[in-house]
Image: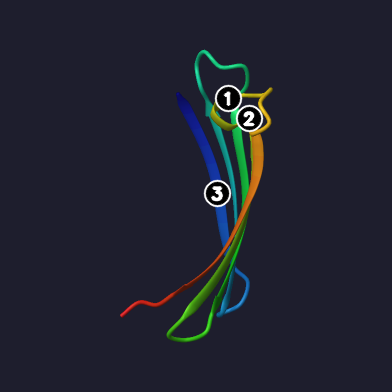
């Protein structure tokens, strides 16, 4: 497998961070490359950070014909550091 990933983050304000990810997995012996595109937003509430993420995946494991060859994922996370 050959993996190529690009990502960028940007502090829009002192409390808001935006991020994007593009990931491509070239899996030898498969029909197509797996591709992942994701966006992320983080908001700092002081002692707690709220992060929301959405990802779109194409050709999971290099498969193009199965019913599960693509999908979307979303999450919201609360975290703290001390």
Q: Quadrant of residue 62?
A: top right
- Judging by the rendered image, the residue that carries numbered circle 3 is 7
Other residues around mark 3 within 10 Å, as few (<14) / some (14–19) / many (≥20): few
The local secondary structure at tag 1 comes to helix
For this orientation, the residue located farthest to the top is: 29
Q: Quadrant of the N terminus?
A: top left
User: Is 82 left or right of 76, judged from the image as shown?
Assistant: left
Other residues around mark 1 within 10 Å, as few (<14) / some (14–19) / many (≥20): many
Q: Which mark is residue 59?
A: 2
Q: Quadrant of the C terminus?
A: bottom left
Please tell me which of labels 3 and 1 falls first in the chain: 3
Q: Position of residue 33 (x, y in %)?
A: 60, 25
Q: CA distance from mark 1 to mark 2?
A: 5 Å
The local secondary structure at tag 2 comes to loop
Q: Residue at x 69, y 22 (%)?
A: 65
User: Is 72 left or right of 6, judged from the image as shown?
Assistant: right
Q: Which mark is residue 62?
A: 1
Q: Residue at x 46, y 81 (%)?
A: 48
Q: Residue at x 49, y 77 (%)?
A: 49
Q: Residue at x 55, y 49 (%)?
A: 7
Q: Position of residue 31 (x, y in %)?
A: 62, 16
| Along the line of sight, the residue nearer the viewer: 45 or 31 | 31
The local secondary structure at tag 3 comes to strand
Q: CA distance from mark 3 to mark 1?
A: 22 Å
Above or below: residue 65 compared with residue 51: above
Asked if the residue under mark 2 is in contact with the one under mark 1, i.e. CB atoms within 8 Å, the reply is yes
Q: Which mark is residue 53?
A: none
Above or below: residue 79 compared with residue 65: below
Q: Position of residue 17 (x, y in %)?
A: 58, 69
């Amino acid at each position: 497998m050959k993996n190529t990933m690009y990502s960028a983050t940007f502090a829009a304000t002192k409390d808001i961070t935006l991020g994007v990810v593009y990931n491509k997995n070239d899996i030898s012996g498969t029909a197509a490359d797996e591709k992942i595109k994701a966006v992320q937003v983080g908001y700092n509430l002081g002692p707690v950070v709220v992060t929301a993420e959405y990802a779109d995946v194409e050709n999971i494991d290099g498969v193009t014909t199965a019913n599960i060859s693509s999908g979307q994922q979303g999450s919201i996370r609360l975290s703290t550091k001390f």
